[in-house]
Amino acid sequence: MEYITGLLIVVGIYAILATSLDLLVGHAGLLSVAQAAFYGIGAYTAALLAVSHGAPAIVGILLGMVLAALASLALSVPTLRLHDDYFFIAAFAFQVIFLGILSNWMSLTQGPLGITGIPELTVAGIAISSRVRFLCVTAMFAAFAHVATDRIATSPLGRALRGIREDEEFTQALGKDTVRIKVSVICVSAALAALAGSLYAHYMSFIDPSSFTVMESILVVAMVIIGGAASRWGPLIGAAVLVMLPEGLRFLGLPTSIAANLRQIIYGSLLVLLMLLRPNGLVGRYDFER
Amino acid sequence: MTSKGDLEPQVRCLRLCKSFDGTVALSDATLELVGSQIAAIIGPNGAGKTTLLNVLTGVVRPDSGRCLVNGSVTAGLALHSITKLGAARTFQDVRLIRKASALDNVMLGMPGQRGEALLGALVRVGVADEEAKNRQRSLGLLEFVGLEQSARSPAGELSYGEQKLLSLACCLATDPQVLLLDEPVAGVHPGMVPHILSRLRSLKAEGRLVVFIEHDIAAVREVADLVVVMDGGRVIASGTPSDVLSRPEILEAYVT
């Protein structure tokens, strides 16, 4: 039971991440591999505030979201006036630089040693001491992220985003400030990723830079694409599939050295299969209508 | 119908120059169009007609010279800001959101939507009313161009002529005083041309300035109040169709 709850918590955290990234990849058509950086900003802000300052968890969560949104401006404002390809490269650079800072700013982040002893979550005076409680909190936050992105997707803003995805110049010619729209949505996406990060920090009670690498960003991209970009439940399903899959492999009783490689092979094959059979993801239709 | 004050719609281009990697597209092009009328820009391929439109709408920056739309200088403005000055354009290669319905395409063009701001999208105060109003206006525009039956069809599934009409409706959604149309009848089924031309006349009757680029001289003769002839990046003649299109040197250089 403990094992299943733990697994569901991880699915929930990744569901928030994938949902946040789908705003960019699915709705705005902006491929980004910087999501793990915003995830890391959330995790480190929550961890450092709780460990060094004893701040209440909610302060760490909110501050992490604000910091991630601000950091996203450093990525989006200078690059979005250029073509979208530059955004991808800039996002990659952002991710790499972030990891560099995380690993080397010893006095703040402890570098590769990571941060230990992150206290358990307390929400409104209630200690989230059991895994079941933590799962409830995670589900609540995941539902919040889902509703927020769904409201954006089904609003006139969502229509403008899909306009940008399909033909940015045309959308601009219709009087839409496409740069402002993209900047604001990237802020939301970063803030939601940070929310996932702070949950992760409190859940694991230990974080180090290895959880916030570019490979982690790519995993989240894979979740969005496998689940179905720009579809209501795609990111959640993608997160569930990619978290459960390696767990399922455990029961095959393979030696770890083989299992780790097998996981990569299965990811690869799954992506190829999906491209062939369901190019819009497991539940994706990639329609304009929502 | 136009809502932007009493100012007459106007477009001014003053001594525009633009070259692309040494190829001169505009060289000292000057053009002034004031008041509600239909102006056609004609000229051979490479005369600089589309470049002129691109400079006017901020898609391309001129090397020198300046443009004014409804009295405001467009230099340094982004495409969307020029649309807000009251000038909307269509593209030569019809640009639409092909997967979206005709109605969604027009609704995308509605200006000042509260639901397009982050807070508006999340909190949704008054957004449903605004959407209902915009939907009505958009359906009205689709009716104006004769596409009310196709409101739910994906734009990409419409015929070429219908797509040109839809892109006109999208422009009108922004309620422009000045319409800049790149080849509104080229490649359209001949049976549909009179309908498109009649739409241009109604727009003029509403007090708008319609500027269009066209190769179809019969259409130009029929609908234009003013013909502007371009060649080699400059304006070489302008006047009424009967005057300009009867000059032998122009007929020789371009029309035949």
Image (tube, rainbow, N blue to C red):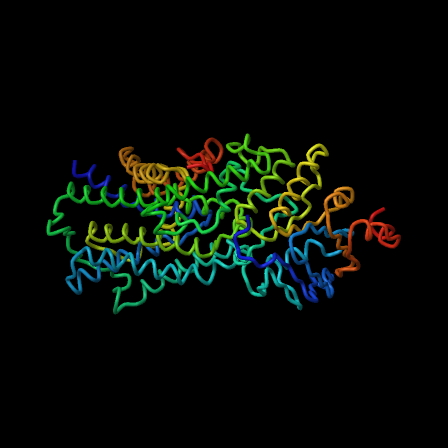
User: Could you say which is closer to the camera, residue A23 or residue B140?
Assistant: B140
**Quarter-wise, where is residue B237 in the image?**
bottom right
Give coordinates of residue A60: x percent, y percent.
Answer: 22, 58
Give coordinates of residue B143: x percent, y percent.
Answer: 56, 35
User: Could you say which is closer to the camera, residue B203 or residue B110?
Assistant: B203
Identify which residue is drawn at 69% across, 46% down.
Answer: B183
Would residue B243 be found to the left or right of residue A36 on screen? right
Identify which residue is drawn at 13% across, 51% down.
Answer: A124
Would residue B122 be found to the left or right of residue B106 on screen? left
Q: Quadrant of the C terminus of chain A?
A: top left
User: Could you say which is closer to the camera, residue B122 or residue B227?
Assistant: B227
Q: Is residue A47 above or below residue A105?
A: above
Identify which residue is drawn at 32% across, 54% down.
Answer: A191
Q: Quadrant of the N terminus of chain A?
A: top left
Give coordinates of residue A230: x percent, y percent.
Answer: 41, 40
Would residue B9 be found to the left or right of residue A281 on screen? right
**Quarter-wise, where is residue B16 in the image?**
bottom right
